[in-house]
Amino acid sequence: MKIHEYQAKELLKAHGVPVQQGRVAFSLNQVPEIVAALPGPEWVLKAQVHAGGRGKAGGIKLVRSESEAVDAARKMFGMRLVTPQTGAEGKIVRRILFTEAAKIKKELYAGLIADRGKNRLVFMISREGGVEIEKVAEEHPEKIITEPIDPGVGLQAFQCRRMAFALGLAHGLAKEGAALFRAMYDAFCANDCSLVEINPLIIDAEDHLLALDVKVNLDDNALYRHPDLAALRDLDEEDPLEVQASKYNLNYIRLDGNVGCMVNGAGLAMATMDLIKLAGAEPANFLDVGGGASVETVANGFRIILSDPKVQAILINIFGGIVRCDRVAKGVIEAAQSLNVQVPIVVRLAGTNAAEAGALLQESGLKFHVAEDLAGAAQCVVQVMAH
């Protein structure tokens, strides 16, 4: 789960990461009071959306007076911010973070992620802060320094010092750097994060470290342990169909294609999407209905898939291991009847009671296209869309 920058800063600040003073405006009439409460004489307005690249898109502004702040906020509120991370549709700005302006002497980078390849948390640090770290990693991988953390013993003091020295920090700054890395690690573990990133981590005019911009992602699977963090979720920043799917415990991700996919099992869903592309079409979504797909589950899946106007056909691919194929077939028939589905439906069912399921589909009186195997199903869905 993603959270906003101002929320991430509060989370890290609670563990000792140095951040600027800041306040959030949810409406224009809050701006004068916020500016008066923050140290000046310059302030920075930062659009709060779940995407990077805000500065180049007009989502970060420096102002030098209350009137400038009000004028900038008026233009920013409600604007559709389009960055490389938002896609062409962009995101609407509904919150603005106001901070005191900082004097920057040096920009650095510090991040902490769960590296599944190494089966441990890994710090990534670089002297190249303030730019896209992905671009640095691609073009100058030698500038990215990694520090894996042994899960058996946790982050050690010598590792914190080693990272501080690797960033070129000396004397008092090295001590601050070591403390900052410890604070990042503590925050990561205490809140079950999947990412903690500070970019840029700056050395300010007073020769102190400051987390100028912060990004934190939380592990959805651990939110049951953190109801306070779950409450930080901003549904306005998420795809409405994905929000709706989560209410039905469906794993749904919206894509840009025209073939709606309904599959049980994440691995099978990925394979289905690959074969759709191989056949010459594009998947419109990832949808995993889970191992116990019921009539209600299938109906909800149909409803969400058909809410996407780009969907021109639906491919259902179910392997009946735990779930019986005839039960899924009944759900597909009932859903197609109740929702009056007008797009072609290609169905491939394999496993438990697959033969009975095929007979139910053929005898339903509905125009299902029943495929024998997955490759044939992918080719069939392309053909039915062409006619």
Image: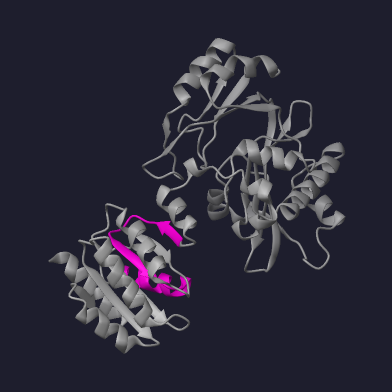
**Residue 307 among those drawn in magenta:** no
Colour scheme: one colour
The residue located at (63%, 35%) in the rendering is 6
Residue 209 rendering spot, x and y as whole percentages: 76, 36
**Residue 274 among those drawn in magenta:** yes
Left/right of residue 240 with respect to residue 196 in the rendered view: left
Measured along the vertical axis of the image, is residue 25 above or below residue 158?
above
Occupied quadrant, residue 131:
top right
The residue located at (27%, 84%) in the rendering is 358
Occupied quadrant, residue 118:
bottom right
Residue 40 rendering spot, x and y as whole percentages: 68, 16
Left/right of residue 75 with respect to residue 6 in the rendered view: left
Residue 212 rendering spot, x and y as whole percentages: 66, 34
Q: For this rendering, which residue is in front, 228 or 174?
A: 228
| Residue stretch rendered in magenta on the structure | 251-277
Residue 200 seen anywhere in this rendered image of the structure: no
Residue 23 rendering spot, x and y as whole percentages: 65, 26
